[in-house]
Image (cartoon, rainbow, N blue to C red):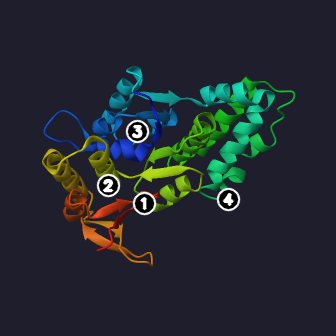
Amino acid sequence: MKIEKYALLDTDFISKTHFIHGDTEKCLVDLVVEMPGYCFFCHSQIIKELSRHNQQAIGWLQHKISEQKIQCYTDEEILNELVKIRGDFACSTYTLMLKDACDAFSKSYFKEHYQTLENFDVVTSTKQDYLETLQKADDEIGKHNSLGEIKSYVLLQLLSLLKGEQVYVFCSDDKAARNGAISFNNVRCISALSAFLRLKKEISWTFDAAEPYINSYVQFCGEHNQQTFRVMEASVVARMQRVPCKQALEEIFQDRFVELQNGFLKYRDA
C-alpha cells in the first residue's frame, strides 16, 4: 500500500498510550502504528526522555524501530538529509529550523540555550564541528525543558520539506505543546483521546473492540487524578467543557464528536 500519511510520535503520546491495554497483548500505541497508510517517525531524543516516563516503552520503541515500523532520526541524520537538499547551507538551515521549533514554545528559548549556534561560523567549520556544538548546547539544557518536543518539531519541519504533505503529530495532551505543533503549516495534532476517534475512522474500530482500551484509559486517568476531559462545545463561540472521561470515550463511538486540527474533540452540531 502506498504510504500517504506521515506521522510523528512524541514522548508523552508513546508513554501514555503504552500504558493503555486491551484484552490482547497489544497496547493502544500498537494499534496506532499499525494503522494502514501511515509512516511513523520519531526523534532519537524521545528514547532518552522515555527513560524518565516509562521504562517499558523504551523497549517497545526500540523494537518498533528495529522492525522499521517507526523511523528514528538523529540530529546527524537530519543534517545529512539537509546536506542533500541545501548543500553548504545545511547547518544554517538546521539552525533556522531549530529556532522556529524553539519559538513555538518561547521567543526567548533559542537565545537562552542556542546562542552558540547563532554565532557558529559555517564557512570555516565542518558538519562535525556543528554537531558537537549542538550536542554541547543540548547537554546544558538538561532535563524537563521541552527538548524532546523541540527536536520533534525540527524533524517535523524536515518531513514537511521532504514529503510536501500534511504531517500528523501524535502528541501530548498539553494544550501549549499542541498549539506549538500547529503553529507550523500543514500539521494536524492527534492526542491520546482523539486517537480513539482516529482509530475508529481508520480501522473501523467498534465499541466492543475498543471497550477494554476505554476501561484501561479510564483507570489510567483515575490513577493520575484525572476525572474529566476538556472538549469543545457545539457552538459558534469556542468554549470548552469538562466531560467525565468514560462518557467522552463512549461518545466517540456514538459519533458525537468531530476531530479538530489541534487535537481537541468538538461536539457535533445537534
Residue 151 picture location, percent across and down: 57, 41
Structural crowding at the residue carrying mark 3, measured as other residues with C-alpha within 10 Å and reported as few (<14), some (14–19) or many (≥20): many
Which label lies toward us, 3 or 4?
Answer: 4
* 3D distance between C-alphas at marks 1 and 3: 27 Å
* Residue pictured at 40% horizontal, 39% vertical: 50
Of 265 and 153, the residue lying toward us = 265
Whether residue 122 sits left or right of residue 45 in the image: it is right
Q: CA distance from mark 2 to mark 1?
A: 12 Å
The residue carrying mark 3 is 50
Q: Report the residue marked by disc 4.
A: 107
Is mark 2 in CB contact (under 8 Å) with mark 1? no
N-terminal label among 3 and 4: 3
Nearer to us: label 1 or label 3: 1
Determine which of the numbered discs, if any, sits on residue 193 in the image: 2
Earlier in the chain: of badge 2 and badge 1, it is 2
Q: Are marks 3 and 2 in contact (CB under 8 Å)?
A: no
The three-letter code of the residue at mark 4 reads Lys
Q: Is residue 91 above or below residue 215?
A: above
Q: Residue at position x 18%, y 47% from top? A: 206
